[in-house]
Amino acid sequence: MTTTQKTLVVPLMLIGSMFGVLGFALGMNAFFIPFVKDAFDISITMSYLVMTATFASFVVFGIPSGVIIKKFGYKGGMIIAFIIMAVGFYLIAPAAKLISFPLFLLALFVSGMGQTLLTGAVNTYVAILGPEDSAAARIAGMGICSKTFYALASLLLSFFMDLSDVHLEDTILPFYIISGVLVVMGVLYYFAPLPEVKAVGEDEEDTVSEVSAYANSKTSIFQFPHLLLGVLAIFFDVGVEYIALGSINDYASILDLASPQNYVWFVSVGMIIGYLLGVFFIPKYVSQRTALFVSTIVAIIVTIAIMVFPDNISIYLVGVLGLANAMMWPAIWPMAIADLGKFTKMGSSFLVTGLIGGAFLPLAFGYIADVVSYQIAYSVCIPAYVFIMYFALWGSKIRTKN
């Protein structure tokens, strides 16, 4: 291990724990979809509003999160994010007491604001913390933490809430606890040894590097086409990723399988295996771009298989879809923020707005599942994978001259 690698260990461990918090926060959606369907007696489509509420905040709060990161730095943004998330989860208790689905969605929206800020801060921080060509491998390593806690969310919540015997008041105690834990974590991170970092060319005093020259020739974030296409790629990536993660528990519930809350582990384990492959192969054996392209090919094949195989087999193929999805986010993010220079922090906030895909695509999935079938609903993933393939091969390479 080199001296540089040693100096990255502690910051990456701390950031890894934050990725774990993000995974846990989003993982609760997978548990809540079948839970609220019974608790509020609503349709499958309506139950997917749980994801819509969370991910809608990524658009509303995406640009403000960039302003916060620019003013307070990456570490300051992370700490503020924990406080906002704590407030959001605290609001779930009164929503349960009042039996109010709109208030419940509002609580998830507020929590999503904190997740928006934290997502933009930690992903860009990890991407620029080391060499550019290994950024996807570092983000993949963080993804292992995220998806492990994504699956643990269903397991831990099942100790308080039973999907086979739903009682809304069972949400009160666990979310008081979760809210308190987030506040404590925010305070601890304030004292944590996280160095403030800057992307290549981000230092305004740097006027000679190639990246700075390129970025300084721009007057607007909209003059970086590869970033804007990256936002769309993130939109589709998050949509398909959370279709797989968010639907499998409900799919198992509809098939009347035992312990449906545990099926999210198939997707999470699939993604963790994908992340481990990314850590091992990138950049020594394959580039970030190649990893992204191969992932889309595998994902399209698996999606078609999910649609045509019997449902008692296709549900397990959703776990394989997790494997295919794993390296998409880690590859897209660094490719999209490359060469932004002084616009890096604002660029990260633009990328965060792409997470709205987690609201729209699962909602479209839920509608098709309602009116046609669960298996056919996975067809919404195919156009998404085609666009991500385009970004890998061509879109991420586009640069303007002026």
Image (tube, rainbow, N blue to C red):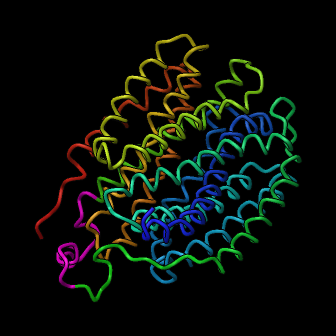
**In front of the other: 217 or 370:** 217
Question: Where in the figure is residue 188, as x and y percent of width and height?
Answer: 70, 75
**In front of the other: 135 or 321:** 135
The residue sitting at the bottom extreme is 205
> Residue 134 falls in which quadrant of the image?
bottom left
Question: Where in the figure is residue 264, as x and y percent of width and height?
Answer: 64, 34
Rendered position, 146 above or below 6 = above
Q: Specify the quadrant that holds the C terminus.
A: bottom left
Q: Is residue 191 left or right of residue 396?
A: right
Q: Specify the quadrant that holds the N terminus.
A: bottom left
Rendered position, 264 above or below 225 = above
State which region is magenta.
Answer: 207-226
**Magenta span: helix, strand or loop, mainly?**
helix
Identity of the residue drawn at 51% across and 63% down: 60
Identity of the residue drawn at 28% across and 89% down: 205
Q: Is residue 210 magenta?
A: yes
The residue sitting at the left extreme is 401
Rendered position, 106 above or below 252 = below
Q: Is residue 214 magenta?
A: yes
